[in-house]
Amino acid sequence: MLFGATGYTGRLTAEAMVRAGLAPVLAGRSEEKLSALVAELAPFAPLDAAPTWQVADVSDQQSVDALLTGPQDVLVTTVGPFTQLGAPAITAAIRAGANYVDSTGESPFIREVFESYGAQAEATGAQLLTAFGYDFVPGNLAGALALQEARAKGAVPTRVEVGYFVGGDSFGMSSGTKASAAAIMLASSFAFSRGRINTERTARSTTTFQVDGKALDGLSVGGSEHFALPRLDHSLHDVGVYLGWAGKATKAASAASSVMSAAARIPGLSKLIDEGLKVAVGENTGQGPTPRQLSATNSIAVARTFDGVGRSLSSVQLIGPSPYLLTAELLAWAAAMCLVHTAPTGGAFGPVDAFGLDNLVQGCADMGLAPVAT
């Protein structure tokens, strides 16, 4: 079941699912758009795995609940901003005890999945996989490999830092990504420090990574790595995740975030800032980079580990397809794995503890995301 199939990321994911031989039920608000997409994809599907469609709307919980029939089902959702629109889909999956996969990159929603929805899923047996796209699967993989490398040297890693970057030509964002980014600008974020999750503002800090001989800056964000990586190595006391999309403007963006965060605490000003961000994003949906733009960019994730006195222990760099193409392939792969892989007991999981490191390495390699020499 693919909810949000006619959006930009949803459409790419539908195409990836059909290529993988799955038979997705494409769900969304518009019967006209859904039927047209099914007709477009049907010629590329196996004869016994043609896509179908079903209408569902986040404003109607019953219509979303109706997408699922039981624990054997898999619900993949790209409907965002997730902080505003994500609750109906994950609620439906938990009620059905089903498998749930989403494409969010929004820190507040990720935290809610692990700290709130996860406990509900434990009671029903639902498996929740949040942020299963460019953000934040590559960082989980790079982080797990870096931890493994450090342990192989006989070292004890206590801190891991993960950086996300985009290579190639300028990176264009879809309308959905812009809306999600606007949704979290004023929201609180988090980090894993001193052995626990702590609240902090988005872009509170910056750090620099060496990528292909270049020094690239990243802004701190809350990712699924903060929850998932400490499960893999209990020696971890600190996890930092950084996004490098702002390029040379990273440090200025961090300073701007501080100003906006302070301004948002002034009565009435938060609403004005929020409305201004919505105007800047625009109202058009379903738009994103062209195929040419997608082919001209690639995904980069870097992870590095340190010991308790700050000595560098290991470093892993991954390179893969464009963030949007990678997200689509990851969502399709996760859906397929949920159908055939014996899942852990119910709850919220990271990519590695859900499917195992070897499976994740192989799956990502098959879609073109793999380590490179550093």
Image (cartoon, rainbow, N blue to C red):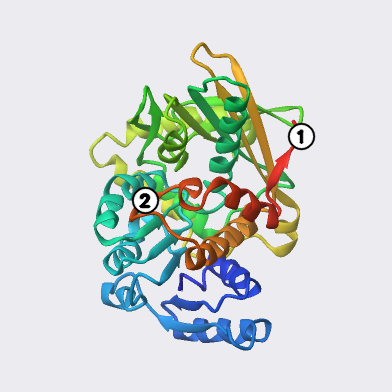
| Of residues 43 and 343, the one drawn nearer to the viewer in this rendering | 343
- Residue 42: give x, y in percent of width and height: 62, 85
Q: Is residue 135 visible?
A: no
Res 327 → quadrant: bottom right
- Residue 177: give x, y in percent of width and height: 51, 54
- Residue 195: give x, y in percent of width and height: 36, 25
Q: Which mark is residue 335?
A: none
Crowding near the residue tagged with mark 1, few <14, some 14–19, many ≥20 C-alpha atoms within 10 Å: few
Amino acid type for the residue under numbered disc 1: Ala
**Up/down of 4 relative to 299, above or below:** below
The quadrant of the image that shows the C terminus is: top right
Q: Is residue 285 left or right of residue 191?
A: right
- Residue 152: give x, y in percent of width and height: 61, 27
Q: Which residue is mark 1?
A: 373
Helix, strand or loop at mark 2? strand
Q: Which residue is mark 2?
A: 348
Q: Is residue 144 visible?
A: yes
